[in-house]
Amino acid sequence: MKNRIIAGAVLLLAGLLLGFVPEYSRLVSAQGEIDSLRQQLDVSRRAEAMNSFRNRAALVYIETTQSNFTVALGMASKEFTDIRSFADGTADAKLKGELVSLLGARDAIVAGLARADPAAGLLVRELFLKMQKVE
């Protein structure tokens, strides 16, 4: 009787282990896939943000060349605020450095747009061209 109980317990334990191993293997595989998808999502979000920054810089340039300095000033201020927020939130040191370097033009651009100086358009154009190099 005692041997039967021990044999039953061993069989039960073996059955549990046989059921656990494939499930654990699937769990590990699913976690790896989740990590891969998260990385792809991060890359996509980064690309989307950079495209948005480029597009908005182009719009600021267009508004500046059309002498809509008030509109361009509002757009530029929001653009720089958003770039700062994105730079602060990124873990990529290279990207953060590139974005912070773009922010160096902020004061000159905002001041030029506030003075309605057409030369501010050149600064915005330079900013846009620098943004094309940021990946």
Image: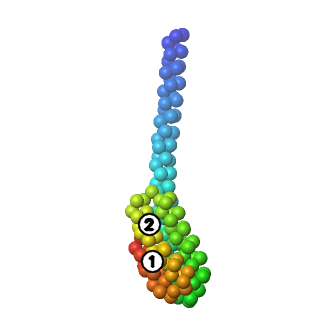
- Secondary structure beneath label 2: helix
32 in relation to 57, above or below: above
Q: Quadrant of the C terminus?
A: bottom left
Residue name at image x 46 percent, y 49 percent:
32
- Counting labels gives 2
Residue 46 appearing in the image: yes
77 in relation to 65, above or below: above
Foreground pick, 22 / 52: 52
Residue 59 appearing in the image: no
Residue name at image x 49 percent, y 74 percent:
107
Q: How much space separates mark 2 and mark 1, taking CA atoms? A: 12 Å
Q: Amino acid at mark 1?
A: Leu
Choose the circle earlier in sequence order: 2 or 1.
2
From the image, tell me which residue sits under label 1. Answer: 127
* Residue 14, horizontal then vertical, whole percent: 48, 27
The answer to whether mark 2 and mark 1 are in CB contact below 8 A is no
Residue name at image x 51 percent, y 78 percent:
111
* Residue 88, horizontal then vertical, whole percent: 49, 60
117 in relation to 12, above or below: below
Residue name at image x 55 percent, y 85 percent:
116
Q: Amino acid at mark 2?
A: Val
- Secondary structure beneath label 1: helix
From the image, tell me which residue sits under label 2. Answer: 100
